[in-house]
Image (cartoon, rainbow, N blue to C red):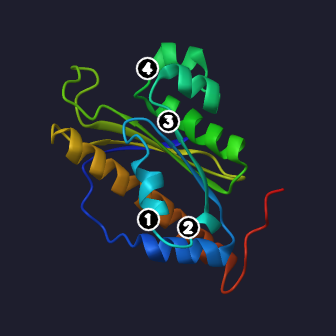
Amino acid sequence: MSHTLSQSPPDLTLDIANLIALATQLGLTMATAESCTGGLVAAALTDVPGSSAVLDRGFVTYSNRAKQEMLGVSPATLDAYGAVSEEVAAEMAQGALNQAQVHLAVAITGIAGPGGSGLKPEGRVCFGLARTGQKVMVETIEFGALGRDRVRAKSCAHALLLLQNSTLQIERILGNGSQITPIL
């Protein structure tokens, strides 16, 4: 599991329609596992015509029980690290990848606000990105106390950016015009 901790990243160029088009061209399939964003990432993907070729499903796992039942997140991990942790984000991403049998899965868990604590402040969001045959990548971003709507919107945009960057990386690895091996 690789990880980074950063402040709110700069707004980078995100083009969801191009993400869907490239993923379709490459034969990639995706799933989302969302807690604090409550399905915003899956909704953003499905706003694009043709997204059904790419998005297999979205898991909204707001409660710990849902994380365990739908994604296989370990109760021990939840007890040891809490729902807002890179460890849980990693298990959510891997669980979504396994359950949906897709090529890419992104997971988001965080404190959208209002509130938080000294240990887990408002605006802390943990992301996981699982890719078939690769280590799960995790990242924590401190968006700050921007308010619930802005934290959720920035979290959604960042998760989409993770999917976009991973798709571009896969394109570079495969080369021009190739497709990824289908998952059976």
Of the residues shown, which amino acid type is indicated by label 3? Answer: Ala
Instruction: Report the disc number at residue 89.
Output: 3
Q: Residues within 10 Å of mark 3 (few under 14, many from 20)?
A: many
Report the mark closest to the observer, 2 or 4. 2
Of the residues shown, which amino acid type is indicated by label 4? Answer: Gly
Indicate whether 66 appears above or below 147.
above
Instruction: Report the disc number at residue 82.
Output: 4
Question: For mark 1, what is the residue?
Answer: 47
Q: Residues within 10 Å of mark 2 (few under 14, many from 20)?
A: many
> CB under 8 Å between callouts 4 and 3?
no
Q: Can you see residue 34?
A: yes
Real-space Cα distance between discs 3 and 2? Answer: 24 Å
Q: Earlier in the sequence, mark 4 or mark 1?
A: 1
Q: Earlier in the sequence, mark 3 or mark 2?
A: 2
Report the mark closest to the observer, 3 or 2. 2
Answer with left or right where residue 175 lies relative to residue 82. Answer: right
Report the mark closest to the observer, 3 or 1. 1
Q: Residue placed at 24% from the left, 50% from the top?
A: 8
In the structure shown, which secondary structural element does the residue marked by tag 1 occupy? Answer: loop
Instruction: Report the disc number at residue 28.
Output: none
**Furthest-left residue in this view:** 146
Q: Can you see residue 143?
A: no
Check the picture and name the quadrant holding the N terminus.
top right
> CB under 8 Å between callouts 2 and 1?
yes
> CB under 8 Å between callouts 3 and 1?
no
